[in-house]
Image: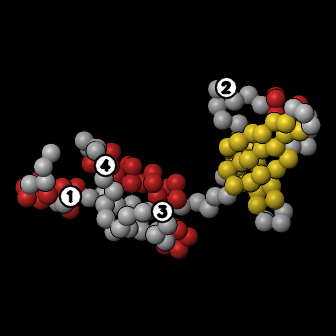
Amino acid sequence: MPATPSRIAFITKPSRNFIAGPDVDVEAAYGELARETDPDAPVETFFDSGDDAQAMADERLALLSPERGRYQAQLPDGLSFALALDYSQATPTGTVIDLERDTNKPALTGELGIDLRRGAASIMMWG
């Protein structure tokens, strides 16, 4: 669709712009790192409903709001524990406890490494 003056006026109407935030914690943590484009430029979407666009803006903010981390660990029971995980129906979750970082929070399994030769396994969790 060509960018005619009427189309540009329609797209840039304030009633068509949906904003979640501002959240000063998100801005302080990420700044302009989350976008490769101008941070003040709107994110192009193709929603038919303004409610859907607002819901997506709120979900983006909710994803960026909590502090998340990536945690890697060797599994104590090695192979037997890793092979017993059932990831066929849902992503396995657990609790990451790291006393050095004062961390005790839920996380999901992002990667599972199995070394059959050594009988060892490692897990990467995100949360």
Above or below, 34 relative to 74: below
Task: Give the CA distance from mark 2 to mark 4.
Answer: 32 Å
Image quarter of residue 109: top right
Q: Residues within 10 Å of mark 3 (few under 14, many from 20)?
A: few
Q: Residue at x 30, y 57 (%)?
A: 18
x, y percent for residue 42: 31, 60
Above or below, 82 relative to 88: below
Mark 1 touches mark 4? (CB < 8 Å): no
Looking at the rendered structure, the kind of residue marked 1 is Ser
Local SS, label 2: loop
Mark 2 touches mark 1? (CB < 8 Å): no
In this rendering, the label closer to the viewer, 3 or 2: 3
What label does residue 34 carry, if any? 3
Task: Give the CA distance from mark 2 to mark 1.
Answer: 43 Å
Image quarter of residue 6: bottom left
Q: Residue at x 83, y 66 (%)?
A: 100
The mark nearer the N terminus, 1 or 4, is: 1
Q: Residue at x 69, y 55 (%)?
A: 70
What residue is pinned by disc 1?
15
Looking at the rendered structure, the kind of residue marked 3 is Ala
What label does residue 38 carry, if any? none
What residue is pinned by disc 2?
88
Local SS, label 3: loop
Query: In this rendering, would 17 be left or right of 8?
Result: right
The image shows a total of numbered marks equal to: 4
x, y percent for residue 19: 34, 61
Task: Give the CA distance from mark 3 to mark 1.
Answer: 25 Å
Looking at the rendered structure, the kind of residue marked 2 is Ser
Above or below, 64 relative to 31: above
